[in-house]
Image: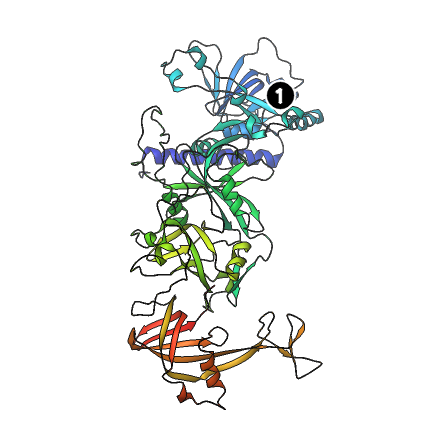
């Protein structure tokens, strides 16, 4: 707002007005009585009520001061007392919760407006109003009112009627049960049980209009019809993470609830909103929610505004919104005729979004699963990894199918284990079958904020699986699974491939061979000649042949046997694991030192080499120098230029 301008002064005036009203109501509640000063107080009894342009209009009978001591039932109306039309703002009407036959005290500064061609004065500025509750029978009557449902007639006045542009009598005045706003709690009788309670209230198609008309505290008796664009889970609180032990992910859910089911919805005007629904004890059901709900129409009710966020505050949310913009079909534009052909390409993307949440004890979401998908719905456009790596943009949302070959937990000890990211190394047919395509395998970072279900976490720890990565974030040469990214094992039928080659891998997987372009935190294939051995790093330890436990103990009954405290059994045939670091000379990196950490159990080709080094009874170290090492699958820990050194670790692909 311009400093010192009219808008700023009006804003200050509105703030002072709201403060004065809140203070006055607080005084009335704390004093628990009606103010004693009756000078200038207008006392009316409500005869009829209806709503017009979000204003509650009450047809009232003015009462004398002596009637103020009577209850609303005992107040006698004389024929000579004037009829008034009293206007209550939406906030005032919600505070009063008035009904016909109620007695209302209206305190100054109320104003009377006399209109031409009418004998009924209009009372405005009724913010300082209070409903009279006298006697036990009045309190009983209030409780009885609270158990019934009252419909307030809502007059819909079109602009055509206001400016006399339409002469059709049938469109001048619309009064029907669908245009009535429910006031008070609902009770469904037997005839209503077959009909959803939301179906009996007013339906709107604009999120922004609903927010502006119902306020920040939310709406209960009206609903808005939207399209579900995305279904995902958000972490409800800290404490959930996929832990990896021995390259096997374990989905832990301490404390029970750890994620919240969320919907990204869009209305007919293109407005987006994120709806946060109930908490889930597991994210395993997200696949069926995506299949059943995405693309469907739903009606929201019982919502309240949790936050109004912008691009600067929620870049992740808006990166997902931008992937759904512009709309695929023309949308409604406020203030323009909906009959004309509208182009959606030049519409600016939304700059803000409302975060909605449910109110307790309300009917919240009604999804029409039987109806076909909306034309406004935009399913994820599936691309091949080769095409994604060629995208020049930053913070772009994309979706793809890929085969997971290897997974690894971040090893930074300064980061708590439940906040560490997981690296998935994936590939697809566009990388494997392409000629002169580099790389053959790409790394996908799964951030701690990305919710993984137990099913997919355990599946990735057992074998290589084909996984659908929906709405991942691509930018600065990295693919990241962040909040609102969904990983699925099932192939949804709605998601189009956009011409990408999504055929499954048939032959053996090929890795990029180690060369000068190899980067840290990647996997590659390695071949070379042994030029050195770091004997100080050689060690071995026994493990359980059943569960792989590496912390065996001596059996209490027989000190000559080993005991596994996980299996609670004696280990008869322990498996000996061995580790050693060797230095290789590689033709592709002639100027660099290549250091490889090899394992006995993992490397069949190097088992003989390690066995020779650890059993010095039969072999000398010099006897293995110069040996050729076959093609090994390795994880690249680091690549340094001063000195030129590459540190690798032998791995086994899933």
Residue 282 in picture, x, y percent from top left: 57, 51
Closer to the camera, 641 or 574?
Answer: 574
Q: Is residue 277 visible?
A: yes
Question: How is the rendered protein coloured?
Answer: rainbow
In the picture of the structure, the residue carrying the numbered disc 1 is 68
In the rendering, at what x and y percent does residue 586 appear?
Answer: 32, 76
At 54% across and 12% down in the image, what residue appears?
82
- Tell me residue 386's x, y (percent): 33, 54
Quadrant occupied by the N terminus: top left
Question: What kind of element bears circle 1?
Answer: helix
Residue at (47, 29) in percent of width and height:
204
Could you tell me residue 379's position as x and y percent? 41, 41
Q: Does 395 appear above or below 182? A: below
Q: Is residue 365 above or below residue 244?
A: above
Question: Residue 507 occupies which quadrant of the picture?
Answer: bottom left
**Which quadrant of the figure has residue 521?**
bottom left
| Between 489 and 320, the one nearer to me in the picture | 489
Please tell me whether residue 486 is drawn above or below residue 642 in the rendered image: above
Query: Relative to 17, is 365 on the left or the right?
Result: right
Asked whether residue 128 is in view, the answer is: no
**Left/right of residue 3 with respect to residue 48 in the rendered view:** left
Q: How many marks?
A: 1
Question: Does residue 515 appear left or right of residue 248 in this picture?
Answer: left
Q: Local crowd at mark 1 within 10 Å, few (<14), some, or many (≥20)?
A: some
Asked whether 398 or 312 is in front, the reply is 398
Looking at this view, name the residue that lies furthest to the front.
Answer: 507
């Amino acid at each position: 707002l311009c400093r010192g301008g009219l808008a700023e002064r009006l804003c200050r005036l509105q703030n002072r007005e709201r403060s004065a009203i809140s203070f006055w109501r607080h005084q009335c509640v704390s004093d628990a009585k009606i103010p004693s000063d009756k000078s200038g107080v207008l006392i009316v009894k409500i005869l009829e009520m209806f709503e017009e342009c979000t204003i509650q209009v009450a047809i009232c009978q003015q009462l004398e001061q002596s009637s103020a001591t009577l209850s609303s039932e005992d107040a006698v109306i004389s024929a000579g007392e004037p009829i008034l039309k009293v206007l209550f703002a939406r906030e005032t009407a919600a505070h009063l919760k008035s009904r016909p036959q109620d007695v209302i005290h209206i305190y100054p500064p109320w104003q009377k407006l006399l209109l031409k061609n009418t004998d009924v004065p209009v009372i405005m500025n009724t913010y300082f109003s209070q409903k009279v509750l006298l006697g036990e029978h009045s309190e009983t009557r209030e409780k009885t009112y609270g158990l019934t449902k009252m419909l307030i007639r809502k007059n819909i006045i079109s602009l055509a009627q206001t400016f006399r542009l339409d002469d059709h009598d049938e469109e001048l005045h619309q009064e029907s049960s669908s245009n009535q706003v429910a006031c008070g709690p609902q009770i469904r009788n037997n005839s209503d049980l077959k009909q959803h309670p939301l179906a009996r209230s007013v339906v709107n198609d604009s999120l922004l209009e609903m927010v502006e008309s119902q306020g920040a505290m939310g709406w209960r008796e009206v609903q808005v019809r939207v399209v579900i664009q995305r279904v995902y889970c958000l972490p409800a609180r800290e404490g959930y993470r996929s832990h990896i032990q021995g390259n096997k992910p374990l989905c832990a859910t301490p404390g029970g609830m750890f994620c919240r089911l969320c919907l990204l919805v869009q209305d007919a005007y293109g407005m987006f909103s994120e709806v946060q629904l109930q908490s889930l004890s597991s994210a395993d059901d997200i696949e069926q929610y995506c299949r059943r709900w995405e693309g469907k129409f739903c009606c929201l009710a019982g919502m309240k505004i949790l936050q109004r966020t912008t691009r600067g505050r929620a870049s992740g949310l808006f990166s997902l919104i931008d992937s759904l913009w512009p709309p695929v079909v023309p949308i409604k534009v406020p203030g323009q005729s909906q009959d004309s052909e509208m182009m959606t390409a030049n519409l600016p993307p939304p700059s803000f979004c409302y975060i909605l949440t449910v109110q307790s004890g309300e009917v919240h979401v009604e999804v029409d699963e039987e109806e076909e998908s909306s034309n406004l719905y935009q399913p994820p456009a599936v691309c091949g990894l080769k095409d994604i790596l060629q995208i020049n943009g930053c913070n772009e949302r994309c979706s793809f199918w890929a085969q997971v070959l290897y997974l690894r937990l971040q090893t930074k000890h300064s980061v708590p284990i439940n906040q560490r990211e997981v690296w998935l190394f994936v590939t697809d047919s566009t990388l494997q079958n392409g000629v002169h395509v580099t790389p053959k395998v790409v790394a996908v970072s799964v951030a701690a904020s990305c919710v993984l279900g137990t099913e997919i976490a355990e599946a990735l720890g057992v074998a290589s699986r084909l996984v659908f990565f929906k709405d991942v974030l691509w930018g600065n040469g990295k693919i990241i699974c962040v909040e609102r990214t969904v990983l699925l094992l099932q192939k949804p039928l709605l998601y189009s491939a956009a011409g990408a080659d999504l055929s499954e891998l048939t032959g053996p997987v090929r890795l990029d061979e180690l060369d000068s372009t190899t980067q840290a935190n990647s996997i590659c294939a390695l071949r070379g000649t042994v030029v050195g051995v770091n004997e100080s790093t050689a060690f071995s330890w026994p493990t359980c042949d059943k569960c792989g436990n590496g912390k065996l103990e001596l059996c209490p009954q027989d000190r000559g046997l080993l005991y596994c405290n996980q299996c609670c059994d004696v280990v008869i045939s322990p498996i000996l694991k061995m580790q050693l670091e060797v230095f290789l000379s590689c033709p592709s990196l002639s100027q660099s030192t290549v250091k490889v950490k090899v394992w006995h159990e993992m490397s069949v080709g190097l088992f003989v080499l390690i066995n020779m080094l650890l059993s010095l009874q039969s072999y000398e170290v010099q006897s293995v120098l110069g040996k050729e090492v076959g093609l090994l699958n390795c994880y690249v820990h680091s690549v340094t230029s001063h000195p030129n050194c590459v540190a690798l670790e032998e791995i086994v692909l899933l």
